[in-house]
Each structure stands twice: as C-alpha cells, then as structure tokens.
Image (cartoon, coloured by chain):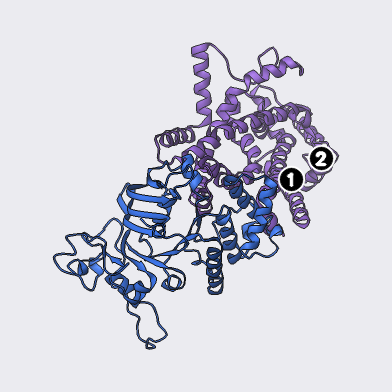
Amino acid sequence: MLAYLAQRFLLAILTVWAVSVLSFFIIQLPAGDYVDAYIALQRETGTLVSRQEAENLRTQYGLDQPVYVQYAKWVALILQGNFGMSMEWRRPVLEVIGDRLALTIVVSVVALLFTWAVALPIGIYSAVRQYSFGDYIFTFVGFFGLATPSFLLALVVLYLAFSLFGANIGGLFSSEFKLASWSLAKVWDLLKHLPVPALILALSATAQLIRVMRANLLDEVRKPYVVTARARGLPERRVILKYPVRVALNPFASTLGYLFPHIVSGSIIVSVVLSLPTMGPVLLRSLQSQDMFLAGTIVLLIGVMTVVGTFISDLVLLLIDPRIRLVGGR
Amino acid sequence: MENEEQPILSVRNLKTFFFMDEGTVRAVEDASFDVEPGKTLGIVGESGCGKSVTVRSILRIVERPGRIVGGQILLYRNAAGDRPGHVDLTQLEANGPEMLAIRGDEIALVFQEPMTSLSPVHTIGNQLIEAILLHRQVSRREAREIAAELLHQVGIPRPAGRLEEYSFQLSGGLRQRAMIAIALSCDPRLLIADEPTTALDVTTQGQILDLLRSLQEERGMAIILITHDLGVIAEMADDVVVMYLGQTVEKGPVDDIFHAPKHPYTQSLLQSIPSIHSRPRVNLPTISGSVPHPYNRPSGCPFHPRCPEYIVGTCETRAPSLAPVGERQEASCFLYEDA
C-alpha cells in the first residue's frame, strides 16, 4: 500500500515535469513572440515601435536566447517561487492571477456542489423508476441541458434579466466592490452574485452527470447482491441506497481530478460573456497577446491541478473501494 | 386436514407475467406445488422454464415489468398465537411491513451466483449483522457474536476474522457458505436455494449440498431446491416438481418421478442423463427441438411441438391440467386423462 502510494507520488512528479515542458513549448508554438504581438498592437493605434526598441524589449524578456535556455531560466525562477512578470500587465504573474485563482475555485466549487446536489438524486430517481413519467421528463430536460451551449444560455439569461428586471447579472461583484479590498460586505456581495453564474456553469455538467449516474445505477440494480439484500427483508429504500448507489458512486471519485481543469478551460467563453473575474478570460487574453509567462503559468497550474486532483482521487478510491485497497494496491 | 399433512407453503395456479413493450412473457403460467415442513422440494426444468421467477414470486421480489397476475401462495403458520393460520403472499404489498417481516425471517434465499451475490464493497460481517439486526431484537454486539457463530456453523474456518473480509477475498465455496449463513441468520422455516451449486466446482458442490442437508436436519427447516441438475435432485429432494414453460407438468415423490415418470417431458429429461450402464460412443437421447421463444408460446399443451407422444387434434387445441396419476403423483398430460 505504501509502495503503491510512493509509486503514484513519483509518477505525479514526473507528470508535472512533463507538463511544464509541454506547456512552455506549446505557448512558444505560434509564430512570433510577445514583442511581435506588441508591435502589431502599437501599429494599430498608430504608434511605431523602432527596431532598437524591439531589440531592447527582447533582451529585457530574454526572448533573444534559445528556447531551452528560456525554459531553464523559467523553471529556475519557478523553483524559487517566482513565476515571472506578465509582459502585458507589467506586474508579477502571481499578482495577476491571485484573486482570480481564488474566485475560480469558489465558482467551481459552488457549481460542483450544485451539480452533485441536483444530479445525483435525479440520477438515482431516474434509474430506480426507469421509463416512468418522471424519468422521461428528466431525460428530456437532461438532453436539453446537454445540447444547449452554456455561453448561449448565459447570453439568454443576461438578456432576460436585463430586459425583464433591468438587472445586470454579469460579473461577480457590484461595481462599488469591484476594486475594493476584501471585507464582509464584499463577501456578501460575492455570495449574492454567485448563484446565477454557478448555475449556468453547472448546467451541462449536471445534465451529463444525471445520465452517467442513471446508467451506472441501472447496471448495478440488476446485480444479484441487490436481489439478495432485498431477500433479506431490507426495506427498498435502504436496499438501493446502501448497495447499488454506493457502488455506482465509485466512478465519480475517479473523475474528481478532471473537474478543475474542465471548469477553467471549459468555461472560458461563459466567463467572457458573463465578465467573470476568473482565470478563463485571462488565459484567453494572454494566449492572444503571447504573454508567455502568464499563459505558461496558467497552463502549468491547470496541469498541476489535474495531477494533484488525480492523486487525490486515487487516494479517495483507495479509501472507498476495498477491491482496490486490498487487491489492486498490493 | 391432519396436522402432519399440512404443508408450510402451498403454491396454487401461480401466474407471473412480464409485460414488455414487445409483448407479454408468461414466465410462470400455471405453477402448483406444496412444500412439506422439514422436507426438500426439488424444482427442475430447463433454463427459462420459470423456476427462478416462481421463487421470486414467493418472496415477492419479482422485478418490474413482472407482476403476479393470478393464483395463490399460501404460507401456513401454527394457528396458535396472534398470527393467522395462513397468509396469502400474493395479497400482501410487495414492500409492505408484513412482507418485509416474512422475507429473510420466515423465508430466506440462497442465490445461484456466489461471485456476485455479496456486495463488493461491504464486508461479510456487515451484511450478516445487517440481516440479524433486521429480524432479531439483539444489540449490535450480540449480533456480532451470533454472526461469528453462524459462520462457524456453516463450516467457515476462523469465523471472527472472516467477518472483516470482503467477498472477493473468499473462494467460491466459502462465499456460498457465507451466503447460507446470511440466509440462516434468522432461523427461517423455509430456505429457497436457487441453483446453489451451479457456479461451483464438483467437489465444492458436494460439500455445499452436504452442508444444506445437515443444517436441515439440525433445524428442521424446509428447503426448495431449484436446479437443472437431475443428479442433485436425486440426491437431495424428497419431492420433485417438473416445470416446463412456466407450468408444473409433473410432481410427486422423488422415487416415483425417477422410476415411473409419467409425463413425456419428464421421461425425455430422464433419458438424457448419461448413465454408467449406457453404451460408450453412442449419442445420448436428446429432447428434439428447443425451448420455444417466450413470445411464441405454443397453443394447448406447451410441450406438444417437442412431444414424442403428441396426440394430433388434442394437444395443440386444449391445455391439460394436473391430475393424479399415482398415489401421490400428478401429471398434466392428455395421455392420462381418460384413465
């Protein structure tokens, strides 16, 4: 068991390293660099950047050196806890990301809780009452949720809220709190703004989870151990909740690891539409402007989160599934 | 009725149908038999003849879209005490308190697949103690002691330690013993064993059957043993019910069924058993044709398309019913209707 954990841990570190290499090279892939993008932007506004000035910028950011030297420097800085400067924002990367990272996590967690709280009971109901009227209703709603692009839903909700109630539901803060420092009033303001974006972000995952839970449970409720539990005289509700639901939940533990990257990268457009101060829009913007340290850090962060999440879900699986703990973990 | 003659369970003209989109499957069409106290009733028949659905009907755990549509299942009790002399299980609510109190307490089930009959994520002890606590007024600690004692009784070595183990850590034979321990936890009057040895290797089969027999002697419980293995029936059963396509075609004491089978289906079944006396390298007799598709049930006697003694003009038009063909033997066949 300990050996299993150690092996998992070493593999995790190796994976993080591979992710760092990949993320660095991927953001180098598009033609040109930040300075080219900067020059192009300046030209649009009518300012010309001289060749000398461009060279200076390149030296300043180390862009004139070979890629592997740039990578080595980047990693060396990261190991010291310094993620470099954002070229576009002209501030340390961590400072740019800081609040947004926290808000992203808050929004993700709320969306996740909503997803589970709604999808799991509905999935159980749909499986236990398969082909009932309720099952058909939820199936219809579920496919509707799956087929509707979230950003479209966001636009529709924005429009309706504004045209019917005159409310602007975009963003996570009222305008007076946007730049204010953290206080109880600001937290309360955040809580008031959270439900709508979290709901929109959770919709497709909820629809998906209902289908997965229903299918998992349908596989399990027909198994003999459920029949024998029933034959023991256990009341039906306890039969279902104690046995097949318990087994059907196991696969969810293994998907924990993908939730965070999914919410960050899957919600970019929604976040832009709803102008949420989360990571998604910053990632998009930094990729456009080839702000490599910022983009690299975010991509690396998502990678690390995935690896850590996977590691955690391995641990959870180990805890809840004796088949893995006692046989697979040997 | 004499007390000695009184069965503990009497199934009369049971009909359990499955209402599918494609049509109605008459899984149990007309099953009738009695279970005597302390005796073993063997139910035998090919796959799909409705054996399992019959016992699930008795326990009222038939899954939708299946439903009992007719007949009676009478569970007899001693008239003494506050409980009535008998209760018709088909009239009870499937998940109502009365049925829950009967299930697992008065009637218990051992299932055919020991591999999957125990939860993969709960320990043996968890499931065994759960069964004890459901029907007995004992504390959790007492239940634990009873559980260990039960495992000991079914021949599981170092029972206290096994309580903490999971089903996948046990061999097939031990798993089936654990299943039997769970079924026996509340001292049932009737144990239903649905193909209890099918998934086990031959030596283990023998051990499990011996165990069932000795437990029956100790506790005096009745057993319904479902199997397609006539050898097991010959070894274990006092009485036999032969089923074909959901119908009881013949029933009687085991010796009569084996030595003087009356129904052509029973006769064909017995002929298809390899014997030590049969000539080598000669094909075994088989029953011609195969079990009809459930949506395509033959008219009249369901066996007539495969019957070697098919009476043209009678068998395909009318359905025979069970009638005495011997002292305690009954068969459902036109060959004996005139006699």
Q: Is residue A251 left or right of residue B251?
A: right
* Element assignment for label 2: helix
Q: Residue furthest right?
A: A80
* Element assignment for label 1: helix
Q: Relative to the observer, which residue lies in front, B114 or A300?
A: B114
Circle 1/circle 2 CB separation < 8 Å: yes
Q: Which residue is mark 2?
A: A78
Q: Amino acid at mark 1?
A: Ser
> Do marks 1 and 2 both belong to one polypeptide chain?
yes
Label 2 marks a residue whose chain is: A
Q: Which residue is mark 1?
A: A20
Q: Which chain is purple?
A: A
Q: Is residue A18 left or right of residue B105?
A: right
| Chain-order first, disc 1 or disc 2 | 1
Rendered colour, chain B: blue
* Image coords of residue A71 (percent x, y): 78, 45
Q: Amino acid at mark 2?
A: Ile
